[in-house]
Amino acid sequence: MSRNIGDVILDLQNISLRFGGVKALTDISFNIREHEVRAIIGPNGAGKSSMLNVINGVYHPQDGKIFYRGVERKKMEPHMAASTGIARTFQNIALFKGMSVLDNIMTGRTLKMKSNMLLQALWLGPAQKEEIAHRRKVEEIIDFLEIQHIRKTPVGRLPYGLQKRVDLGRALAMEPQILLLDEPMAGMNVEEKQDMCRFILDVNDQFGTTIVLIEHDMGVVMDISDRVVVLDYGKKIGDGLPDEVRASPEVIKAYLGAGH
Amino acid sequence: MGFFIETLIGGLMAGMLYSLVALGFVLIFKSSGVFNFAQGAMVLFAALAMARFSEWANAALGGNSLFLANLIAFVGAGLMMLLVAWAVERFVLRKLVNQEGATLLMVTLGITYVLEGIGQTIFGSEIYNIDVGMPKDPVMMFESLFEGGILINKEDFIAALIAAVLVGLLTLFFQKTPVGRALRAVADDHQAALSIGIPLNRIWVIVWLVAGVVALVAGIIWGSKLGVQFSLATVALRALPVVILGGLTSVPGAIVGGLIIGVGEKLSEVYIGPMVGGGIEIWFAYVLALVFLLFRPQGLFGEKIINRV
């Protein structure tokens, strides 16, 4: 691969997360390097989405430290994560259903809009010029994801696979450093999965975006990721190159059950 | 025929005012999912602020320029509504993100009483006048078309015009500007809006401010017609059937709903009223809303409710 995998961009140390008496994550440590595709896999209920929500600032772990570019991250909320360059997509698509594809992706530019909110509200001078510049960027993303033909369609009317693509587009509009993808291929057919894989790899390759990916489908993950973390019952049971992970007895046990 | 049209026009104009109050409901519900019971109290509060500020400014200016005094009062009352919006977000909504709709509704009931109380403490509880120089005299129109012509109240006409302009501006604001887009995004999905960095807190202040300004305009118009008094707060109750009819999430729905209710009230009072001994105007709107709830629970323009099973 032509990409240069860089230094550690996000370092998670001894993360534990509890909801009341339920332990969602127990003492998990791993890191994410710049420009890599990092997958988090595991059976249902392993804590994959919880992990993603910790990174995104939705959940606040009771124990553990998170270092972002070498600086310890203290209090974190989703909109703060967004402003430090962490974008995400959702497992159950969370698009703005009544709005067009174009408008949905435009909302991803919110943080990039520099002019005063009052000017924006009154649609005056610099705000108008700025909007046009953002629009150009969004059109690039629309071209990139090959969704030109549906740009004016309300998102609620699109088939599932395309909605997933718009979700990715909105996250891309933020020009993120790290892109968190929560089961980007869940519920897709083979062809849609292939398309999505291609987009993910292209994003990683062309924009250098670091990608953290949760996925169920082992085959897909092994093909596109550089390194894989395996979770089971909220504990880390594997971490390494796809081939190493695949060969690990513990991982095989978790996926296929004991006795194999 | 002339009389029918006169009643119709009277109803349309009254309806425009209902629309204005209903618009306040819709704005807040659309962008935060909160059914704001305090909209009526906001109308009262804004009208009280306007009436008293105008009085004080007029006195300070020595009664020379009513227009200037009203302008100062309008800006002052607008700032009061900004203060209300900020306080509601800071002390109420921020603490209650992602709570049930019922909880938030109860909270707005609380806000109603707080606003009514504070309003009367600061501004007094007598009946005040708002004089924005609206012409009170009626005019005759279409005298050549109908026998006796049609009597139109100029004040109503101007009020309806102002309401129409306001609605137009709000539509543009919601559909065309980046802030409007962010508002619609927040309305659709809080979590997703947060994840792309839309500042929820600031958005809420803006929404409540816009609803506050709408309340102010409604308050001025109602106030200059009827005087500013406590009963203004119950105007909101008259607008409830309007939002049920038009749909809680639709700006055009609020307008059309208001017009239907306004016209319906007037026509039913005049034509059906005598048959049942009058007094229909008071409850007609609610019955109409009830019938609508039976057949179209989402209202005329509301989003259809489809649940995945």
Image (tube, coloured by chain):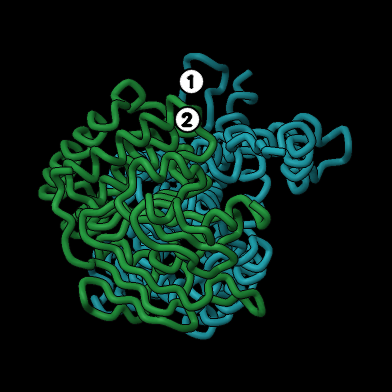
Chain colours: A green, B cyan
In this rendering, the answer to whether A259 lies above or below B163 is below
Circle 2 residue: B140
Location of the N terminus of chain B by quadrant is top right
Residue B203's image quarter? bottom left
Give the farthest residue toward the right.
Answer: B276
Marks 1/2: CA distance?
7 Å
In the rendering, at what x and y percent does residue B97 appear?
52, 68
Direction from residue B218 to residue B276 in the image, left or right: right
Chain for numbered disc 1: B
Callouts 1 and 2 on one subunit: yes
In this rendering, the answer to whether A110 lies above or below A195 is below
Chain for numbered disc 2: B
Q: Callout 1: helix, strand or loop? A: loop
Circle 1 residue: B143
Name the residue located 65 percent from the left edge and 38 percent from the top edge: B305
Q: Callout 2: helix, strand or loop? A: strand
Direction from residue A152 to residue B84 in the image, left or right: right
Name the residue located 58 percent from the left edge and 81 percent from the top edge: B117
Q: Amino acid at mark 2?
A: Met
Q: Can residue B188 be seen in this snapshot?
A: no
In the rendering, at what x and y percent does residue B139 appear?
45, 35
Q: Nearer the viewer, residue B238 or B6?
A: B238
Location of the C terminus of chain B by quadrant is top right
Name the residue located 51 percent from the left edge and 50 percent from the top edge: B30
Residue contact at pointers 1 and 2, CB within 8 angstroms: yes
In this rendering, the answer to whether A7 lies above or below B284 is below
In the rendering, at what x and y percent does residue A34 appear?
21, 60
In the rendering, at what x and y percent does residue A19 appear?
61, 75
Q: Nearer the viewer, residue B124 or B197?
A: B197
